[in-house]
Image (cartoon, helix red, strand yellow):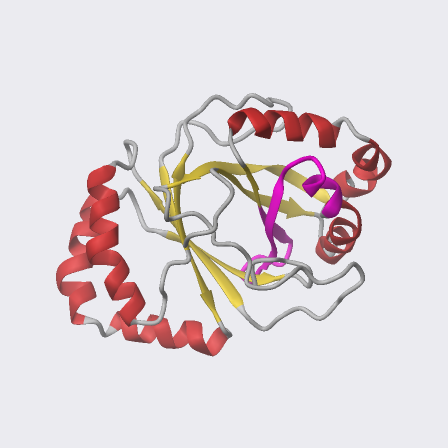
């Protein structure tokens, strides 16, 4: 996972008006990618949620919290957002579902992209899937959990075809740009994996279901540690997503 630049990451989930997801994606990929990166952000990925036809999910990163505030002020106070915000906002029902995250350690952030971003106007979306698995807990995730994930959870995931690409947890720092709210009072641990296609994801889930190590050793401890059931976001990258 070396090569990561972002020490602060936003996982943003937007609920859109019926039939408006492709409208927003077209606008976003034409106007909001390079213009945000010009302020110092890192646009990590844009996605359609497979299980929710009107949900748009995206990830953006920042070097640190101080530069996050500066970049957000520059973009949302700048000419590109002023020119297109009404069109963007018209597609949205809710844009406040945002998790503020940080890599678990220096090796667990998103890696540098394997290929350059497709040019503006490119429409050929890949067949790959990105899956984000979200664990909740009634207290912050600590080093003990990180070690458990690294030494027990991760090997079984890798053996069954889902090597974690990045592992993030809640960034508890104050949101210094309150004009864009984030979810507070929560403790999450999120791991991401990439699959070549739906068949590869299905094969992983079958292997995991039949894994003795998973059911005998990992799952009992995991279930005793987290609160409730994990949430899985199954995402298809857009045409210009770097994470694909």
Residue plotted at (32% across, 75% down): 206
Lateral position of residue 220 relative to residue 140, left or right: left
The picture places residue 103, in percent across and down from the top left corner, at 40, 42
Please identify the residue farthest to the left as the structure is shown: 216
State the count of labels: 0
- Towards the viewer: 79 or 15: 79
Which image quarter is the C terminus in?
A: bottom right
The picture places residue 198, in percent across and down from the top left corner, at 49, 74
The picture places residue 33, in percent across and down from the top left corner, at 71, 48
Q: Which residues are magenta?
A: 34-59
Residue plotted at (43% across, 76% down): 200
Tell whether position 46 is magenta.
Answer: yes
- Towards the viewer: 161 or 114: 114
Residue plotted at (42% across, 32% down): 171
**Measured along the vertical axis of the image, is residue 193 above or below residue 3?**
below
Residue plotted at (25% across, 36% down): 142
Which image quarter is the N terminus in?
A: bottom left
Tell whether position 235 is magenta.
Answer: no
**Measured along the vertical axis of the image, is residue 60 above or below residue 194?**
above
């Amino acid at each position: 996972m070396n090569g990561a630049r972002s020490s602060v990451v936003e996982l943003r989930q937007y609920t859109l008006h019926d039939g408006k997801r492709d409208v927003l994606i077209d606008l976003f990929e034409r106007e909001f990618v390079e213009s945000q990166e010009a302020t110092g952000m890192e646009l990590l990925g844009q996605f359609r949620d497979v299980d929710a036809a009107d949900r748009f999910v995206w990830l953006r990163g920042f070097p640190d919290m101080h530069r996050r505030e500066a970049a957000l002020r520059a973009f949302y106070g700048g000419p590109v957002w002023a020119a297109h915000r009404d069109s963007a906002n018209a597609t949205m029902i809710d844009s406040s579902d945002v998790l503020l995250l940080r890599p678990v350690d220096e090796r667990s952030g998103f890696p540098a992209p394997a290929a350059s971003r497709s040019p503006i106007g490119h429409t050929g979306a890949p067949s790959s899937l990105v899956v984000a698995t979200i664990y909740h807990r009634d207290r912050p995730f600590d080093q003990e959990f990180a070690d458990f994930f690294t030494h027990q959870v991760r090997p079984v995931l890798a053996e069954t075809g889902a090597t974690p690409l990045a592992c993030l947890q809640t960034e508890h720092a104050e949101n210094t740009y309150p004009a864009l709210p984030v979810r507070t009072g929560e403790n999450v641990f999120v791991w991401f994996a990439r699959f070549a296609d739906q068949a590869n994801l299905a094969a992983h889930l079958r292997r995991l279901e039949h894994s003795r190590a998973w059911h005998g050793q990992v799952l009992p401890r995991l279930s005793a540690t987290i609160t409730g059931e994990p949430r899985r976001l199954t995402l298809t990258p857009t045409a210009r997503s770097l994470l694909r």
